[in-house]
Amino acid sequence: MSIHKNCYFLLILVLNIYALVSGDGINVSASDSADTLTQSSPYSPAAAVVLVNSPVFRKPDVDSIFSLNLLSSFPEDEEISVYCSDLLHIFGQRYVTYVNCSVNSSRPVKVCQNCYSSYGSLTEIYLKISSEVVPGNESCRDSILRNDRLMLVYLLYNNLEDIWGKSDCANCVTKGFHSLTNDTLYFMSSVNQTLTCFEKYKEGNHTELCKSCKNTYRGLNELYSRMETNKTMCIDIEDVMNVTRKLWSKEYNCSFPREETVPVIAVSSFMLFLPIIFYLSSFLHSEQKKRKLIHPKRARSYNTLMNIQDKLS
Amino acid sequence: MANITKKVSWSSRADESGVTAEGTPLLNGSEQPRPSRQLSRDGIFQVGRLSTVDLEEEMTSEEESLRGRPKEIPHNEKLLSLKFESLDYDNIENQLFLEEERRMSYMGFRCLEISRWVVCGLIGFLTGLIACFIDIAVEELAGMKYRVVKENIDNFTEVGGLSISLILWAVLNSAIVMMGAILVAFFEPIAAGSGIPQIKCYLNGVKIPRVVRLKTLVVKVCGVICSVVGGLAVGKEGPMIHSGAVVAAGVSQGRSTSLKRDFKIFEYFRRDTEKRDFVSAGAAAGVSAAFGAPVGGVLFSLEEGASFWNQMLTWRIFFASMISTFTLNFFLSFYHNKPGDLSNPGLINFGRFESDSGAYNLYEIPLFIAMGAFGGLLGALFNKLNYWLTIFRIRYVHRPCLQVMEAMLVAAVTAAVSFTMIYFSNDCQPLGSENKEKYPLQLFCADGEYNSMATIFFNTPEISVRSLFHTQAGTYDPLTLSLFTITYFFLACWTYGLAVSAGVFIPALLIGAAWGRLFGILLASITPNGSIWADPGKYALIGAAAQLGGVVRMTLSLTVIMMEATGNVTYGLPIMLVLMTAKIVGDYFVEGLYDIHIKLQSVPFLHWDAPATSHWLTAREVMSAPVTCLNRIEKVGTIVDVLSNTSTNHNGFPVVMQGADSDEPSKLCGLILRSQLIVLLKHKVFVELARSRLTQRKLQLKDFRDAYPRFPPIQSIHVSQDERECMMDLTEFMNATPYTVPLETSLPRVFKLFRALGLRHLVVADDVNRVVGLVTRKDLARYHLGSHGLEELQLAQT
């Protein structure tokens, strides 16, 4: 244990020194901005993205190992092997690619459509890192993933995995991250169809739009609810559907109007009226239930009666 | 005679009837010594004595009709009904009993103890099964109904004609409720309501006719399914308690009189003492199945009923409760496709409050207390309105067909009001993956959104409660919540007391949850950083507790039930404070709902203590006199005459013994019950017959048990003219050591003795052990503390 603690201490020391040495204006500002972002939105993936994007990460890929070599004198086996550092390097690159892609397609949400391949390659490299069986009898799992308290690589990957899981992208992408599923493609094409229809009638009176695009929109809605029950949805589909629905109901005001106020009020007030009649008629016509009083047998004598009155007065 | 006390207690007012009654006591008082002297003088000529008594009664009744006093009055809360009798909690220690006890081996007693446990286990198991059945049936049927209506509404939103959906909804509701109401009104009226008042009375020691029969159970279960599916503002939790009690009463007897099946087991338990203990276990099992609160169930039995409590009984009751909860869990786990999962208890599951926002701070305690006070106020209003409504119902809506119609109307109006509220609501919320609406109604909301008013109205009340507790802040508009609170308050108040079997727990929780959540939302909006600590779900829970406490006024058990149902012990303190304040505030105005209904049913209910300021009343004023006594060796004809006298429907008769000297007054030597006499007559246990037929089997305790609990009426027992002349020896069968009190015992003392021992008859004897009077439950229950001091309830035929 003590050795480990020492190692941590040394590592921190080294990193500090490194930060002092390589710290320049850009670096500081970038990490500052990263910090503020982290504070403002602790759970948003964007923060993580900025962290990754910042030059602290990108620049020292090569240098850090070098400087580590310079500044510390770990025994051979404590260091990570070249193979593993290569893997780590690739992991970093792919990570950045995926995160970049995700950020760029975060609004409107297209994370599944645009980034599935980069996520696939990220998973692939992570699997390589974390697998036990490796060529040349060296496992990077322990040296990279589990060597310290922070377990940064694991944490980073886990974050992305969570995001991927939350977005349900797996439903829209075929196994092995080769392409989007047919359902998704079909859905996207029908969304496009609807949107084109919207485009076409956008000018002028919206009632016409409501009338003309009703069928395509309805078809889209049905398709969506079918996919919802089949559980073949991902965030992209949900989002694009949301936008379309918003366009339809809020922008073009094609929701159903509240038109039958009068009949509804009439029927319900009729029903409210019924109990009044009922209670009135039962009050007037129904025979009131009377109770027959029974006089119990009681014993009494003069003096008790007097006693009671005395006591009370 | 009743007038005297009335006169005394109302002496401040110039009461007209009291003035006219002045003469009667004097008359009676002067006449009083005559019958008793006669009794002592010619004890042999019992018939003659009886006829004098009869004569006297006729005289007084004539007198009254002469004075023009109304003999019939409209029903009110100040009556005691004659139809209710006491349970015999006290053991009848006659010679047969002693003999049986002597015969019983040590093993026999061990077996009894074990079979008590077995019965409790069975009670828990069956209660859990019934709860499971109700839950699944309600969920499936309500699901079907809501799907049909939703489909219809969705269709008609598009093409127009929503008023048709409204009618469809109303008709469906009324039709379903009609089935339940017909069952209740025509087949078993005692199954109406939640059943908690009835069980409370039963545990208090009042024998409510037909309350623990199989037929009642069947009607109750079907009725509650109908009323919940029918969309009334009711819950299925209260009836569970009644169902548990019926199950207990049935299982412990080892037979069903309705089905005419006798399994020849548990015969020892066929008496009121044992049965009542099991019924308290059944009630506990019912609570426990309803709320997933085993400890709460035990405490409910303790608080609401059992005056007779011991450690072993408590432990057994707890066992029954536990078994019931986990039976329910076990079977529901199969229904929810998670077989073996035992962690989702209760018909109503409040869900877990475990998030950080559910934490509370010291500065919130005053807020909680204020909410408790508000809940008490609202509860008092609820009870008062319901009280007036119930009186009206008893007086005017008493015919079964009218009751069915009323229930149907309420169902239709509930649907109409709900629909109108949903129709005019502008509160639209996005459909989310977290708040899974079972039947989201879109109506005029934008696509992808649903009407948030429909979440609370277009759902079974249980689901609405849960939704109010747990959906995140912002799900409900303040306007939606306030409208909902107001309408649901009146709907629930209107619904309770209909001829349908349904409980008031859930509606009260729902009203409270709605205004509690509203309070939370307002708090969050008016206080700085309120949105951080003022979690609407937490305030919904507190509001629900306050409202429920304000309506039913339960204390300890309700606290524990709420705590267990939320699965969070840290809420114990706020819930307790809230319930305390709600009770204090509410009691200032009006009693709890169950107590009101007990009173309105004219039940002779004995509270924990005699009314205050009643020490000046003594047994002399309280008791009934003169007493119909029987001789130790009595003529059969006399007994038959006494029993068949309809004007004096007595159930217990002091047995007196004539001294050796005929001048010596006859002294009390025992007490015998009507049920025992009937069994004796049925088996023709006559002295002459025993002499002639030596082979005749001796009557055993078993014969009394076989006749229990439905002893045949005296009319069904045929006694020939010859047999009337025979004699009957009661020595063996009477309770040779009845409790007696002297004439000067004060009312609280009599009361305490009566309540603590669970007596049915208490003989009042004078200094030479002559019987001068008899105190029964009705004699004690008629005194109560009203606004004008001590008041006296009148006996009435209902």
Image (spheres, coloured by chain):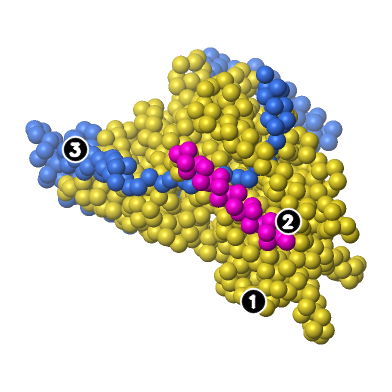
Residue B191 vs B387, above or below: the answer is below
Q: Pinpoint the chain carrying mark 2.
A: B
Q: Amino acid at mark 3?
A: Thr
Which residue corresponds to the image point at 82% horizontal and 67% vertical from the top-left? B732
The percent position of residue B387, horizontal first and vertical second, equals 46, 36
Which residues are the magenta region?
Answer: B45-68
Which of the chains is blue? Answer: A
Q: Pinpoint the chain carrying mark 3.
A: A
Neighbours of disc 3 within 10 Å: few (<14), some (14-19), many (20+): few
Task: Identify the residue under disc 3.
Answer: A261
**B391, B232: nearer the viewer:** B391
The percent position of residue B286, horizontal first and vertical second, equals 61, 53
Which residue corresponds to the image point at 87% horizontal and 68% vertical from the top-left? B99
Q: Quadrant of the N terminus of chain A?
A: top right
Closer to the N terminus: mark 1 or mark 2?
2
Chain B appears in which tint?
Answer: yellow
The percent position of residue B717, horizontal first and vertical second, equals 62, 73
Helix, strand or loop under label 2 = loop
Task: Identify the residue under disc 1.
Answer: B721
Neighbours of disc 1 within 10 Å: few (<14), some (14-19), many (20+): few
